[in-house]
Image (cartoon, rainbow, N blue to C red):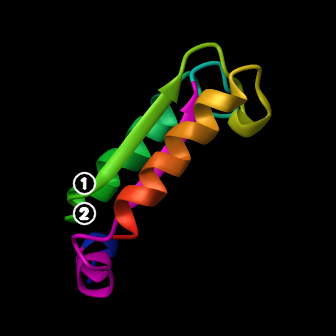
Amino acid sequence: MCIREWYKRQVRADLPMYVMVGDQDPLNDGTRLSDQLVQRYRDAGLTDITYRIYPGARHEVLNEVNRDEVEADLVAWVTRVRV
């Protein structure tokens, strides 16, 4: 069984997923790697994916100059999905 089939059997398709990255993260090759990650989640059948890219931010998006924006987005997402 391939990993995608395993994942589809193990994880609810409606499981909320939140991915946040900075577009200047040197570990992310721009956003190439996070783009691939999000696409793999979609390919695995996940349907509720929120993908936030923060311009100018690097690896630790919660410790950037736009921290208030990042935190507000995360709090809004948590509020939405916990209902």
| Picture residue at 46% right of the left edge, 47% below the top | 76
Q: Observer-nearest residue: 43 or 48?
A: 48
Residue 40 horizontal/vertical position (percent):
32, 54
- Residue wearing tag 1: 42
Residue 29 horizontal/vertical position (percent):
59, 26
Number of other residues with Cα within 10 Å of mark 2, as a class: few under 14, some 14 to 19, many 20 or more: many
| Picture residue at 30% right of the left edge, 46% below the top | 39
Position of the N terminus by quadrant: bottom left
Q: Report the label total.
A: 2
| Picture residue at 56% right of the left edge, 15% below the top | 55
Q: Observer-nearest residue: 13 or 72?
A: 72
Q: Look at label 2 and name its amino acid.
A: Leu
Q: Quadrant of residue 51?
A: top left
Residue 53 horizontal/vertical position (percent):
49, 28
Q: Observer-nearest residue: 54 or 65?
A: 65
Whole-number angstrom distance, CA of label 2 to CA of label 1: 5 Å
| Picture residue at 40% right of the left edge, 69% below the top | 82
Position of the C terminus by quadrant: bottom left
The stretch drawn in magenta includes residue 11 = yes
Residue 7 horizontal/vertical position (percent):
32, 77
The stretch drawn in magenta includes residue 83 = no
Q: Secondary structure at mark 2?
A: loop
Q: Secondary structure at mark 1?
A: helix
Q: Is residue 8 above or below residue 73?
A: below
- Residue wearing tag 2: 46
Asked whether, in this view, residue 50 is left or right of residue 23, the answer is: left
Asked whether, in this view, residue 18 is left or right of residue 16, the answer is: right
Cβ atoms under marks 2 and 1 closer than 8 Å: yes
Number of other residues with Cα within 10 Å of mark 1, as a class: few under 14, some 14 to 19, many 20 or more: some
Q: Is residue 40 above or below residue 31?
A: below
Q: Is residue 72 above or below residue 30?
A: below
Q: Which residues are magenta?
A: 5-22
